[in-house]
Image (cartoon, grey):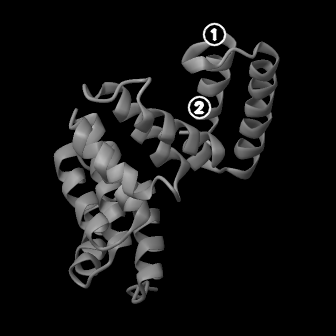
Amino acid sequence: MTQSTPTSEAEVITTAKSLLRNGAFAEAETLLAPAIEAGSAKAADLLGIAHEIGSGTPKNLALATDYYRVARDRGNALGTYHYGLALYKQSAFAEAFAVLATIAEVNPSAAYWAFRCALILPDMGENSAEATRYLTLAARTGHLGARVKIARQYLRGQNGRLKAPLGYLLIARAFLSGLRALKRGDKQRLY
């Protein structure tokens, strides 16, 4: 009994994910390459992930970045996020900041990593308005690390924040929020 070839984008992605989980990179690539040629941003993002983590193929961040760029150029928000993180991992902090800032309003992790980029950029730093903006945005949209960072600022009196009781309350809320995110499997709030 032979399996039929997946035809829809959703079938291609589902089948390719299964193949990648089993280390069958060549077969997954055979499915994903035509989908990318046909304009699938999700296929480009998935192939980028496979190259980045080395799922059945050697790890190759440069090639993964190229696929993430294709996904971003085709309007895929998750591909945009992966592209920004790949730039960050390659120490292209200004570029990463610009990319992540474009989706920070809809992706809590993108807002947090835009904040992390701002910390590194020489014209910004931790006390800059841009860094504070993205940290606050990440925390407001539920990012656990951002909430803990703000709570610590309150506890330490940083950035004009010296309210220990509020800091302790924010730490407790961040912890509970993290537990709920883990229960739901909501990775965008954790990383």
Q: Which residue is mark 1?
A: 156
Q: Residue furthest front?
A: 160
Quarter of the image holding residue 38? Answer: bottom left
Quarter of the image holding residue 12? Answer: bottom left
Picture coordinates of residue 75, whole percent (x, y): 35, 72
User: Is 11 drawn above or below residue 30 in the view shown?
Assistant: below
User: Is 152 drawn above or below residue 130 in the view shown?
Assistant: above
**Residue 48 left/right relative to 185:** left
Q: Which residue is mark 2?
A: 145
Picture coordinates of residue 85, whole percent (x, y): 34, 44
Report the residue at 48% width, 41% height from top: 134
Mark 2 or mark 1, whichever is nearer to me = 1
Q: Secondary structure at mark 2?
A: helix
Disc 2: CA contacts within 10 A as few (<14), some (14-19) or many (>=20) = many
Query: Callout 2, which amino acid?
Result: Gly
Does residue 181 appear in the picture of this structure? yes
**Residue 43 left/right relative to 190:** left
Report the residue at 38% width, 86% height from top: 5
Q: Secondary structure at mark 1?
A: helix
Picture coordinates of residue 159, whole percent (x, y): 55, 20
Picture coordinates of residue 88, whole percent (x, y): 29, 38
Report the residue at 51% width, 45% height from top: 109
Query: Callout 1, which amino acid?
Result: Arg
**Residue 118 left/right relative to 106:** left
Counting residues from the N terminus, which is met first, the one under dot 2 or under dot 1?
A: 2
Report the residue at 79% width, 19% height from top: 168
